[in-house]
Amino acid sequence: MPLSYYDKGVIYKRTNFMGKAIKCFEKSVKLEAEIADKALLELTKVYMNFKDYDEAYRCIENAVRIKPNYINYYFMIHVLNLKKVLIDDILKIAYETKVDQLMLVDIFYIEGNYEIVLNLIDESLKKNRTSYSIELLKIKSLLKSKRYVKCEDYIDSFPQNYLYSFKIKMYKVLCCMLLKDYSLAFRTLDGYDYKKLSIYNRKKLEAYINFYNAINKIEDESIYGNDKDYVSSIFEILDILLQVKELIYFNKMRQFAIEINYKEISLQLAELYLVHGYISEAKEEVVRYLKNEGEVSAKVIKILGKLI
C-alpha cells in the first residue's frame, strides 16, 4: 500500500528534509481531507521551527476550523504567544473560536502565564465550575508565581478529609521551605503515619523528606533508589525550584538527585534545564554524561538537537 502524502511528509520532517516535508503536507491538505488537520498541524510545527510565525498561525488557524480540539487550540495559543500578541487579544480570539475556559486554564498553565491562569480560575470558581485539576493548577500557579503565603492559605482552606489532602500538603511543605519556615515544614511532614500511606504516597513523602534534609544539611540517602515514581517527585521539586529561581535550594537538591543514579538523572536534568532556558547548564550535564558514560543514546541525540 503506497504511503499517504501525510506519511511521506512525516518521514521527510524526521530526516530534516523540510522543503520536501512542506510540499507533502501541502498536498495532504489538498488531497487527503480526512487528515488535513493533522497535515496543517505538522506544517505549523515546521514553520514554527523556521520562526515564520505568521505562516504557522495561518496553518493552525485552518486546522482549528477543520477540527477544534485541544491540541490544535494549544498550538493556536502557543503561536499567538510567539507572535507576541497581547493577552487580551489572545483571549478574544480564543473565545471567538469557542475554546472552553477550563481548557484555557490548562493551556495557559503550560505556557507559563500564571497570572492569566489565576484570573481564569477565579472566574470559573465564581461560576461554580471547579475540579480537582483546577484546584491543583491554582495551587501550582500560586507556587510558581512566588505567592507562597497565598498558596499556603489556599491549601489550608481545604478540609482535612479532602480526597487529595496529602498531595496538596506536599506543596505546603514547599511553600514553608521557600518561606524558610522549616519548623512548620517539619511538622507537616511528620504528621503522617508512614504505614497508613499508599505506596505511591510513601515515595512522594520520602522525596519531600529528602528535600527537607538536603536543605537543612541533614545526612540522608534514598531508600527508593531510581524508582520511577520517587524520581518523578524529586523532579517535581526541582522543576518548581528552577521555575522560581531558588538556585541555592535547587543546587542542593540537584546534588542529592545525582547521587541516586547519575546515568539516568543527568539527562533528565539536562531536559529540565532546557525547559527553563538554562542552555549552558544543559550542555554541561550532557557533556558530563558523555564523559562518564560514553554512550550516545537516542535521548542524548534528541537533547543535542535542541541545543544546536
Image (tube, grey):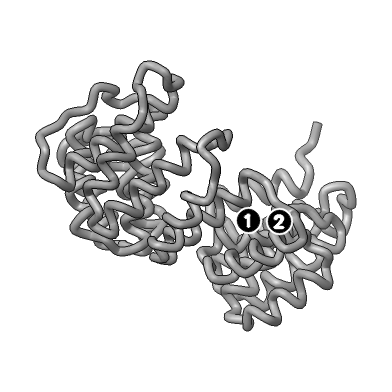
Residue 13 higher or lower than 82, as above or below: above
Question: Where residue 103 is drawn, which disc sits there?
Answer: 2
Q: Name the residue type under label 1.
A: Asp
Q: What residue type is labelled 2?
A: Met
Q: Name the residue under label 1.
A: 106
Classify 57 as above or below 267: below
Using residue 306 as the reference point, say whether residue 91 is left or right of it.
right
Report whether 41 appears left or right of 295: right
Which of the 4 image quarters holds residue 47? Answer: bottom right
**Which type of secondary structure does the marked residue at label 2 adopt?**
helix
Q: In this view, does 39 lie to the left or right of 257?
A: right
Give the quadrant of the N terminus: top right
Q: In which quarter of the image is the C terminus?
A: bottom left
Q: State the residue at coordinates (22%, 49%).
A: 182
Q: Give the image quarter of residue 18.
A: bottom right
Residue 92: x %, y % from top left: 76, 77
**Numbered label attached to residue 276:** none
Q: How many marks?
A: 2
Residue 182 in sight here? yes
Label 1: element kind: helix
Residue located 23% across and 36% down the image: 210
Residue at 11% over, 38% down: 218
Q: Quadrant of residue 89?
A: bottom right
Whether residue 23 is visible, yes or no, is no
Q: Residue 112: horizontal and vertical position, in percent? A: 51, 64
Q: Where is residue 222 in the image (x, y as percent from the top left)?
A: 22, 27
Is the residue marked by circle 1 packed among few (<14), some (14-19), or many (20+) residues within 10 Å?
A: some
Q: Which of 162 and 282 is in front in this view?
A: 162
Viewer-side residue, 184 vs 242: 184
